[in-house]
Amino acid sequence: MRIFLTYIILFSTLCVFAQYPKFEIGGLSRALADNSFLDQNDTVNSDANQDFNLVFDLAVKGELNKFINFYSELRLGNSLEVFDTSSSYLNLRRILIYGDLNKNMSFEIGDIDLKMTPFTLWNFQEEGIVNENRLANNFREIQRYENFNNGNFWRRQGLVINGFKPIFKSDSIKYKTFGTREVASNEISTPDVFLYGTEIKYQSNIFSFGFNHIDLFSNYKGINYDTNLNNHVISSNFDLNFKKLKLHSEFGFSRLTNTLDNDDSDWINGEFINIGFNINFSNYLSFSSSFRSVSAYFSSPGSQSKRINYSMAPFMFPQTNNNTTSRDISIADIIYDVDFIRSNSFYNRNIDYNLDTFNPIFGVMDPYGLATPNRRGVTSNLTFSDSLKIININAQFSFLNDLVGEGINTKRNYTNYSIAFDLSLDNWLSLDNQFLFSIGYSNSTSRREHPQDMNVPNIDLSCNIFDLGLEFEILNNLSILSSYKRLFSEGKEYLPIRNNDFRIESYNAFQCDLVHEINSFGIGYDFNEKSSVLINYQILNFSDKLLDNSFSINQFFVLVQIQF
């Protein structure tokens, strides 16, 4: 009966939209089967199986009239684990109405994608990425698609208005204003929370100048307090564009409403500045560098909210060693814990006032991206590729320190360097079939020495990620893939704990000496550019010397993908 109703809905939708002047239809289908099991030493936990969860996303785009358009994504899902339709479901993934108010102004209402600048509204990528090959990229892209992580955009529900006004022959003013509802009030203890912002930009061929404002606003009136809570971020950015040289800058401040837990009604103020340049020496070599300074009380929920909610436990085997040891979300969970049916996820979709929890094993230099509070320093990036497209190199170096000392006057020093190297062996050896080799390494450290009379161990934390990948097309469209990923972190840190007023009130001592490994092997076949199948087997090894804990997880995947 459910399948019959689904066909009725689809047929009705197609009939209705077919009447419009323009009508387009597209879609994506994925089928995933996986089997995961712990090593033989664990006799309590059962295997985790997912027997071909199948999803079909139907995208419908129609022109209602010359001013208004409609876009929607309808998901049909089913699990082939059962032989009936009891596990089938129908969801609306996205609905969007958009169009033109006049020739210089457009609007979007519904499920909208928003971003501004890295210090106002920006969705920074998840941790653990250095230089992964196709085996990991397939699953990362699925995770991002399932959790609406489209580049650096945040998926919200609300209204956005875009405008464009020509000034001179090549100059123009662009502006955007939006409003979203983040949390709905229950009229008892939870207030309405809204996010609104404005972006105005003057642009010419040589330079551009912009103004940005965003506010996370809570309407507490009639619930807890007699006032409202705001988190304003205001910034201005200026860019200069020459033939091979580009200069960019952004500076601004934040103002966070003080909570009513104390009598001080002053705002909590923070500020930042970011300046840099990018130079293209040729079509194959470029270099960029930037300096940033972010104060200790800079608060920007739109750019500091994380993609991963590390306060949650992993869904797959949250406890190991016969249910005696709880484990945290690991790099393998971030990539491979895909489930089309499960409604909840440790991928975060919320923008909140407080700084989110992060996992120090990935490093503590930039847990909240460029907007991480209490940081000052320089970041540089070098990119090279040869004319024959054989070699591609990307290297990044960062040297930062605390803007003010935390707990003591002495400041931490942070360093990070990473390098990604790709070698196209097929171009080098003039092979007909694709043959790719990739390697990457990242090292992030934080250090601070303490006076001996403090009797407190020094801060010395080192976090490393190593990537190795190989892809060889043995026959036309049939490839053998292998990859190795290793995360190893060791040392001690003191993590600041902030109260509701964004002030540091205490510290948590963190210490680790661990290794996470992913050994992966797969076979992939591309039917065409939009259809493929991947068979993947991998072993996840975990070792923690401090907890005297080690275990392994074996995983087997079959992934089928079709786009149209």
Image (tube, rainbow, N blue to C red):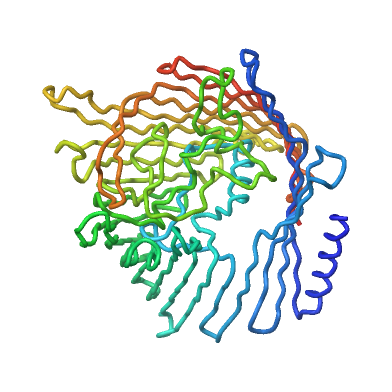
Q: Nearer the viewer, residue 443 or 508?
A: 508
Residue 327 in the image: above or below residue 413: above
Q: How many labels does the image show?
A: 0
Q: Quick one: which residue is furthest to the left in this view?
A: 453
- Tell me the quarter of the image containing the C terminus: bottom right
Do we see residue 228 in this rendering? yes
Q: In this view, does 224 lie to the left or right of 538?
A: left
Residue at the spot 59% in from the left edge and 69% down from the top edge: 110
Q: Where is residue 535 in the image (x, y as percent from the top left)?
A: 73, 33
Residue at the spot 76% in from the left edge and 50% down from the top edge: 77
Q: Position of residue 342 (x, y in %)?
A: 66, 44
Do we see residue 428 in this rendering? no
Residue at the spot 36% in from the left edge and 55% down from the top edge: 278
Q: Position of residue 39 (x, y in %)?
A: 63, 17
Q: In this view, does 343 lie to the left or right of 286?
A: right
Where, by quadrant of the figure, is residue 450 drawn? Answer: top left
Q: Where is residue 24 in the image (x, y as percent from the top left)?
A: 75, 69
Q: Which of 563 and 405 is in front in this view?
A: 405
- Tell me the quarter of the image containing the N terminus: bottom right
Q: Is residue 88 left or right of residue 472?
A: right
Where, by quadrant of the figure, is residue 277 drawn? Answer: bottom left
Where, by quadrant of the figure, is residue 132 drawn? Answer: top right
